[in-house]
Structure formats: structure tokens, C-alpha cells
Amino acid sequence: MNYSAEIKKPERHFLPESFVITDWKALEPYYKALVERKINSRPDLEKWLKDLSELEAVVSEDVCWRQIRMTCDTENKALEDAFNYFVLEIQPNIQPYADQINRKLYDCPFTNELDKGKYFTYLRGIKKNIDLFREENIPLLAELGVQGQQFGVISGKMAIVVNGKEYTLQQAAKFLESPDRALREEVYRKIQERRLQDKAQMNILYSELIAKRHQVALNAGFKNYRDYKFVELGRFDYTKEDCFQFHESVKEYVLPLANKLNEKKRKKLKLDTLRPWDTEAEPEGQVPLHPFETGAELVEKTIKSFKELNPFFADCLSYMKKMGRLDLESRKGKAPGGYNCPLAETGAPFIFMNAAGQMGDVTTMVHEGGHAIHSFLTHDLELNGFKDYPMEIAEVASMSMELFTMDEWDVFFDNKEDLKRAKEHQLERVITLFPWIAIIDKFQHWVYENPRHSLEEREQEWMNILGTFSSSVIDYSGLEQYRKIGWQRQLHLFEVPFYYIEYGIAQLGALGLWMQYKQDKKSALDNYIKALSLGGTKTLPELYSAAGLKFDFSGSHIRKLMDFVGEEIDKL
């Protein structure tokens, strides 16, 4: 099947083409009309669902643009106010109507006549939303939506001075690749000291978020926020016990490989002990990888590498570039991190990141590019709700692209030695990310199982978990004050709680697809496209099956994949 990146914004049939969301008063009549409309047949119901989908897409795109603009410039108060206005003044008014609409759909006699294969996961999600809805949670969820964004505001102000010049923390990270060990240590300590300045502010913010989230869970009839969040995230296909098993498997099968890689790094750098500021470093006389200079160059080179895989992949990025949907370079006042934001009505998503000319930026770009391709592949699905795919498959889209593109990274590097180093960097990162995923996930389970913990208890538990999954090869002595606040740099804890183990589950899926790719490139890419095109219309195990994968994160499966990656690293 041929796919086109020249996606078109569909014509509106329910809302006027010129309609723009300004306030609740202008938006309410459309929700009211859907709640009050009579549905007398299956065709009536299908038309009603399409009108609902159109409204959801318009609302979703509006709030997404507000968030995009705010993260691109955290110092612009008007942009922050516009986002907060939606979250505090519009969203809370939508929620009771959304609940009425969900119940109307679920209770409609013609719902049983809908195609079970097509609508099963959609209706399962509707039932979940009905079960979770509580009127008293509306203001709490609105407050949480605004408060979570404060992480970006606080982090966006963080900068340090190196050699007389100011850098954001993302930009300063490039010095950690320098062969000059004294400079690396200086920059590492400056970054950590800058984070320490906001330690108390981050602690207060997180404590307030925990308390409100716990109350949301209690209001909805759950014992704790973890149990609530598992339902809200639609984790129908695995349990908290599976997460605990994943943690143990990482400790047993991934940590030894991470230690092996760190020992190799120590020897390569000719060091007696490996310190945290050494893990990204290059040996004396070896220049750090510098794959591009500007954001524009990063885009062009990524497009070239995507084209080698499939011209459609390249067309997606080219179209986004034409649409002005890329903001790639790091600057002061910009929120940290990177994301691909789907834009539900117009279709072409937005990629946001903080590029500073490092190898890690290439990985981020192709990762977010994978998410973007997922957005393009699902744009033509009939209902907005069909595009609500699970995060565990969304991250397969992005992480597989990191691995697929590796053989095409010669566009970034002129010589084979640099290309080899880039591939090593990527595969080492795949391994070393697993323990961090286990740390962040295990920490969140503890935090929300013990919501009334003290700051001292939080710190102690964090250090216990960190110690369990830290590489025994890296010497952290004397750095305890920095280690204790390591969690404060993780955006997900503040903005998207419990969204982290998905990276681990998806990385297993991505490695499975890469194994396929190594055997038959075309077949693997076909499976990739086939699975992503389904959006959220199938269950998670079915989506994995469509990609030719097993939905499995048992110890034996993880061990098999680690053996494969270890062999691929040895081949380099």
C-alpha cells in the first residue's frame, strides 16, 4: 500500500470551518447538541460518532497548540496564561459533558450493532472513562494539569556558565563528551549544583502533586494513585506484578551487561576508576562525535536517512518542515526535553527538542520522527478515538526507528570509525537505559503506595532503589548530595506520572523488530507500518502480533534480547 505524507485537514461537517475556541460559552453548544441529539438507528449513531470525533479533534488540537507555544517559550507569560486558561476554565466544563456523552454511547441500543472488531478497544476505553469519572475530581485534575507544567517553567530557567559563556543544561551536556577530564568534572558539578538550587522548590511541587493525585484516586474509589493510574492508562494487558517482574529481570539480565560496557569504557579511557562525568567521554585525542551544526542540518540529514528506509518516512518530515512544525534547537527559556505532539485535526504533528549538536540529539530526532510517522499513518482512521493508541506501541514506533536508521547514519558521519562509534553509543544507550527505566518505575510504585511519606523517607527510598540498579563499575563516592535529587530531573514524574515503564516494554518490542530487520529489512518495515497503521483499534498483544512480535517481558525473553544486543555490540 502506498502512503502519502500530504495529509489533508478534513472538511468540518459539525463545526463551522471558521470556528476557533475562545471560551467555554462559544464551545458549549456543540457538546450540548451531541448530548441532546436523538439517535434512532445505527446510521444515526455512526453520524453522531463522526461529529463527536470532529469536535474532539478540534479541542485536542487547540490545547496541544497552547502547550507547544508555552514549552517553546516558558518566559512568555501570555502563552502560559493561554494554556492555563484552557486547563482551568475550559477543560473542567468539558468533562461533565464528556461523561454524559460516554454514557449516552454506552447505553445506546444501537451500540451493540457496531462492528465488534473495529470498535472493541474504543468502547472498552469509553467504559473505563465512565468507571473513573467523578465530579469532585474535575477541579483537582485541572489544578494537576497546570501544576505539572511548573516543572518545565522551573527547569527552563536553569543555565550555567562554562568558559565565560552561558549554556542551558542541555547545551552544557556536550562538555561531558570532552576528552578534558577536568572540564568534564567541572561541568558535571556545575550542572548538579544548579539543580541543587531548586531542590526545595522541586520537592514542594512533587509533594503537592502526590497529595492531589492520591485524593483523585481516593475519590474514584481506589486504594492508591498507582491502582487508579493503571486503569486510567488503559493497562488492560499487564499488571503491577508484571512491572515488578520486569524490575527483577533488568537487575538479573541487563545490569551485568551494563557493567561490562562500563568496564570497557573505563579501559578505553585508561582510568583507574570510572566517575559519572566519564560515561559519555571520549579518550584523549579522540574528538567527540559532532553529527551536525544546526537544527536545519539535523532535519536535512534525518530526512536523507529516512529516505533510505522508505521514501514515505522522509516525506513525513519534509511535510512537517514545510508546515513549520519543528522547533529543534536548545535555547534559554525553552522547556527541557523533547516530544512529538500529534495534532488531531490538521494531522501533521509537531516535533520539539533541545538539540545542541550531540550524538544524543540524532537519537532524539529519529525517535521523535518515529512518533511522527505513527501520527501520519493513523491520520485517516475514521474516528479520533481510533488514534488513541497505547503508549507501549507508540514507543515501539520511536525506538525501532532509532535502530532501523543506524545503518543510514553515514549521512551524519564522513568516516567509518565515527559511524562505528555512533552505533556503539546507540546500542550502549539501549542497554544503560533499562536500569534507569526500572529505577523510575519502581520509585513511582513506592511513592504512591506510601503517599504520606516524609522528604527524608522519599530520599532514603530513592537512594535504596538507585543503589540496587546502579552500575558497580561507576564510582559515585562523595556525590551523595547530587545523587539524592537525581529523580528531580525526570520530567515524567511531574508531568506524566507512571508513564515510563512503557519505554522498557517498547524497547523490548523495538529490539524484536530490529532482529527481524537484520534478517529481512523489507518484511520488518512492512510489519512496522502494518502495526502502526492500526492505531488503537486492536489490543496491545494484537498490535504486537501485527508487528510480528510477542507481547512478552519475561526474564527469558529479556535474556534472549540482551544476548542479541551483546552480540551486535561485539560485531562492531
Image: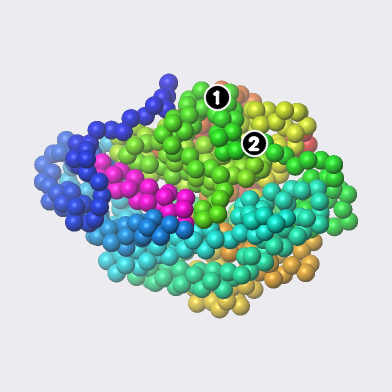
Q: Main secondary structure of the magenta part?
A: helix
Magenta residues span: 54-74
Residue 350 point in image, percent of width and height: 44, 41
Task: Determine if residue 179 is in view.
Answer: yes
According to the image, label 1 marks what residue?
Answer: 307
Residue 397 point in image, percent of width and height: 51, 38
Residue 2 point in image, percent of width and height: 43, 21
Q: Is residue 300 above or below residue 552?
A: above
Residue at x 69% of width, y 48% of height: 174
Q: Is 217 displayed left or right of 34 in the figure?
A: right
According to the image, label 2 marks what residue?
Answer: 292
Q: Which mark is residue 572?
A: none
Task: Determine if residue 131 is in view.
Answer: no
Callout 2 secondary element: loop
Residue at x 61% of width, y 78% of height: 456
Gap in Å between the C-alphas at discs 2 and 1? 18 Å
Q: Is 436 displayed left or right of 550 in the figure?
A: right
Q: Is 299 displayed left or right of 103 in the figure?
A: right
The answer to which of marks 2 and 1 sits earlier in the sequence is: 2
Q: Is residue 138 rendered magenta in the image?
A: no
Most distant residue in the front direction: 164
Amino acid, disc 1 = Lys
Q: Is 9 displayed left or right of 462 in the figure?
A: left
Amino acid, disc 2 = Phe
